[in-house]
Amino acid sequence: PYGQRFKSRLLTSDPVTGTPSKGFDEKAYLSAKQLKPGEDPYRQHAFNQLESDKLSPDRPIRDTRHYSCPSMSYSLDLPATSVIITFHNEARSTLLRTVKSVLNRTPASLIQEIILVDDFSSDRECPPSPLGDPRAFLGLIRSRVRGADVAAAAILTFLDSHCEVNTEWLQPMLQRVKEDHTRVVSPIIDVISLDNFAYLAASADLRGGFDWSLHFKWEQIPLEQKITRTDPTRPIRTPVIAGGIFVIDKAWFNHLGKYDAQMDIWGGENFELSFRVWMCGGSLEIVPCSRVGHVFRKRHPYNFPEGNALTYIRNTKRTAEVWMDEYKQYYYEARPSAIGKAFGSVATRIEQRKKMNCKSFRWYLENVYPELTVPVKEVLPGIIKQGVNCLESQGQNTAGDFLLGMGICRGSAKSPPPAQAWLFTDHLIQQQGKCLAATSTLMSSPGSPVTLQVCNPREGKQKWRRKGTSIQHSVSGLCLENKPGQLATSKCQADAQAQQWQLLPHT
Ligand code: UD2
Ligand code: MN
């Protein structure tokens, strides 16, 4: 019975006895778990179950894709996938609608199977799960690994248990993974209202981001990318994925070490997987022509045996300890309650990282997520020297712009005149609240003038880093150059005199 799979139809046979069934009785399944009169419809699932129960499992939803998506064509031999849905005490109407939306909106040839992993639901009335009967909560992370391990297809597709997939949701994602098996791809996640179950289009300009406490947030794609984005069907590179809905090559998932099986219940696994994918040679992207709706909730409708805060700390702390190198200090600064908390052993995960020869977190920050600012900590006052000249501020012009130029060094490194004294913080080069900035809108094109602006630690134009004797603009990767008459960014050249800077600290 453990080998039984649902072949594009719901329960064609009893998973335990193998007896062919007369098809799946949706009505009986749904009516067995209806709300009692007067019961709070939000209590059990943290969404309005009454509204969900009213809707058909086959309800139509609006096609929310960009109008140029329907004319896209995809390979005729896309690989089939195993869809894996883990759930704990999911409402029957939402779970059934998730499964039926997949059956209704996916070509049968692309679905090898739909694997439902019942993570020890307390309301279970079904026969024992084909995956065995855990005597305790596995949590969503270990449940997904159980599902992935039995999956028969070469491609895995994960879904939450309260989703509705939209028109042609799967093809564009399978296409990307077929072209390059190291890509891990997500759809745009539309919003299904937790109050009335309306299906609402999400913005197509968002990607996954986070702060140093490892708190996930949706953020606007950087302005620079937005300006150069001419094709709205093109995938969006994302530093992290939200976690629940993605497609990954099974062999690649296994090669990368699946999930950290010592993470409990919920949370943090999306960072761990995202860092791992990027740092170990893959990439993460959001495919805008794929849309999947999801019911976003405001609270967890299930209990955490150790409490929800401690579990989140344990999971994110394991992530920080394995993947964030020296940058983990910023995680602890942002989440001091994690200091000293137990998190189990991460030895085998670190070993796995070494074996795969993964890149550093510094590499990740510089190449994948330069917009994440390192908190200002060390402040080194000093001068910035080239030959006999020093970088200096030169007042304001009549238009009110702050002027920057080179002038002969005066005083000493220890006691420079105020106009030649700079503070080098982790990212900013500043003087009395004004910061060096690559000012053109398209900062990645060489030749952008470098001037002074009022400091804003979140402004990509103002982010610099030292690289040997050069000063590199973090976002564009271009180098600060002393051009005749003005300072500008330029293609980095190790032997260019005009790009060599001595940073003499004022100690
Ligand atoms: C988001 C993700 C979710 C997961 C989580 C971080 C989306 C749309 N959702 O939270 O997939 O990555 O962030 O961990 O990106 N479940 C179990 N066992 C448990 C707890 C939950 O199987 O012990 C199931 C649950 O029924 C659901 C899925 O796991 O199908 C995700 O749980 P959620 O919906 O409560 O998480 P969500 O959407 O807030
Ligand atoms: Mn969810």
Image: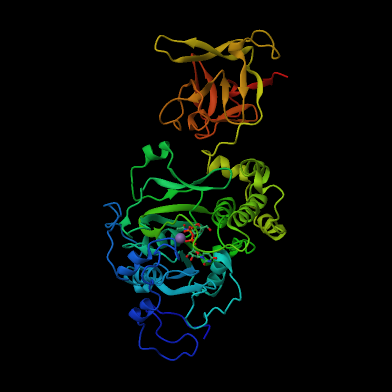
In this rendering, position of residue 130 left or right of residue 111: right
Q: Which colour scheme is used?
A: rainbow
How many numbered discs?
0
Is residue 191 rendered to the left or right of residue 304?
Answer: left
Foreground residue, 9 or 498?
9
The x, y position of residue 74, in whole percent, is 34, 61
In this picture, residue 9 sits left or right of residue 333: left
Q: Can residue 406 be seen in this view?
A: yes
Quadrant where the image shows the C terminus: top right
Image x and y of residue 117, in percent: 50, 73
The structure residue drawn at horizontal position 40% and vertical position 51%, both measured from the top left corner, is 235
Q: Quadrant of residue 145?
A: bottom right
* Closer to us: 366 or 378: 378
Please tell me which residue lies in front, 19 or 215.
215
* Coordinates of residue 463 in the picture (x, y in percent): 54, 30
Residue 125 sits above or below residue 167 on the image? below
Q: Is residue 148 above or below residue 212?
A: below
Residue 236 % position (x, y) = 42, 48
x 48%, y 70%: residue: 89
Front residue of 216/275: it is 216
* Residue 245 appears anywhere in the view: no
